[in-house]
Image (cartoon, grey):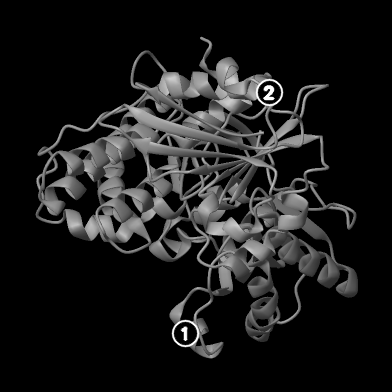
Amino acid sequence: MTLILGIETSCDETGVAVVRDGRAIVANEVASQIHIHREFGGVVPEIASRRHTTCISQLTRLVLDQSGPVDAVAATWGPGLMGSLLVGVSFAKSLAYAWGVPYVPVHHIEGHIFSVFVDPEQSDVDFPFLALVVSGGHTCLIDCPRPHVYEILGSTRDDAVGECFDKVARLLGLPYPGGPSIQKAAEGGDPHAFSFPRAMMQGDSLEFSYSGLKTAVLYEMRDGAPSPADLAASFQHAAVDVLVMKTRRALEVSGRTRLVVAGGVSANRLLRERLTTELDIPVHVPPLSLCVDNGAMIAAAAYSRLQHGFVGQLSDTASASMRLA
Amino acid sequence: MNEAFEVRTVSPEETEALGRRLAALLPPGSVVALRGDLAAGKTCLVRGIAGRADRVAPVHSPTFTIVNEYPAEADGPSIVHVDLYRLTSIDEMADLGPEELFDPGDASRIVVVEWAERAEALLPALRVDIALEHAGHDRRRIAIRDHGVLPDGWPDALAAE
């Protein structure tokens, strides 16, 4: 039995978890959850690395109380906000050094890809597969022939799809984060009321572009006073449409017969429904709790890395703009 | 040289081309402060500014990561692309290390800041200010004001197609 402590601090969430044998979550805490807010006597705000610093020890204490001693410590080492990454990486390396156990650095996107591996409902997931990673910071299609071998087939040229949801929500006067508020606003709206552009659909491109979609929503709003429900529904339809079409195209190109979806936008109901009903292959989507950044996915990826002989050095440091492949 | 210049573009391509012409005039170490609402063309302009060298990483929105850095070619400066959209207070800006970020003595890079109005007090005095405004559909009005960075005669050089 191998227990791994996984730490994720690449952006806003502080995630700490312990996972057994890469598959079973023993403890999983994320410091943007309400009970943690309460425990810390306030909201855990955005960005600042010092906020990771203030809650990382308590979160680690919480999960270790549930798990007992661990066999390795893993942390996200990029990409992300440098100051935030350094908190998790330094903390993880210190623990690994003090306990005399291996330190395993994990790429943030690889972590997301492994989030379905810790879902007990999806014990059948295995390589090879195609991965669609969609979040506030990433939009990419990745061919995953075997563990830790990745090929980026396409990614966004400008805005990430989650960022587009956030910004369109702001245009519509809806609260942050944009994903859930647009999904809610779109209920009862007509997804065909507006014909928004589907960018980069020509030829066999697997690249994405979401900047023009945001602009198109803005123009519709300036041209009149359209129904917010229709706007939200039409926008969501267009945004998801591109993801589904490009995923289908990437499956053809790669010849993969299994799809793994991950990242915050994989919580979107329309996207989940369309991918699972329109593709006649197994589609693995993480439970909602694992769509956001979390430590469990980092521990799961680290377990596999250890199995394949990848161990980090204490001299390894974080990198803000690290490439997956 | 404190000079202002206004230009109108009619497409994202033209905005990007303006960025390329501006890049040719920017000395290493420059700080460029961009202001403009959502979809005003800020990232588009940055793509043009960064486009003078064959960058390893394509320009994309740094809204989520706050800072993207596009590495330089052998002899040119790298481009540091900053986006303050998500910042809610000046304290959060302080966490980014503005002294390092806006160090005018660092000739290894050019720094371009989107949503610069969110850190007005921390911007260096020597900089280029650019305001982008919607002027009907794909048209944009782009006002450029130099604060001691650009070479003499820059408005003519920018206007030249």
Q: What percent of the width, then of the height, locates residue B70?
A: 68, 33
**Element at label 1:** helix
Q: Residue furthest top?
A: B161
| Image quarter of the C terminus of chain A | top right
How far is disc 1 from disc 2 in space, using C-alphas? 59 Å
Residue at 69% x, 41% y is A322
- Residue B119 % position (x, y): 58, 58
Residue name at image x 31 percent, y 49 percent: A168
The quarter of the picture where residue A193 lies is top left
Residue A281 appears in view:
no
Q: Amino acid at mark 2?
A: Asp
Query: Which disc, if any, is residue A157?
Result: none
Using the rendered image of the protein, determine whether residue B150 is visible from the camera's viewpoint: yes
Q: In the rendered structure, which amino acid carries the disc numbered 1?
A: His
Secondary structure state at the residue bearing disc 2: loop
The image shows residue A62 at horizontal and vertical percentages of 63, 84
Q: Please report, as a chain letter, where disc 1 is located.
A: A
Q: Between residues A157 and A140, which one lies in front from this camera angle?
A: A157
Q: Callout 1: few (<14), some (14-19), or many (20+) C-alpha neighbours within 10 Å?
A: few
Residue B22 vs A230, above or below: the answer is: above
- Which mark is nearer the camera, 1 or 2? 2
Q: Position of residue A302 (x, y in %)?
A: 69, 55
Q: Within 10 Å of the Cα at label 2, are there few (<14), some (14-19), or many (20+) other Cα atoms? A: few
Query: Is the C-beta separation of discs 1 and 2 under 8 Å?
Result: no
| In-front residue for pair A91/A102 | A91
User: Mark 2 = which residue?
Assistant: B152
Q: Is residue A177 above or below residue A111?
A: below
Residue at the disc numbered 1: A35
Q: At 74% across and 48% down in the image, what residue appears?
A: A319
Residue A120's place in the image compared with A200, above or below, is: below
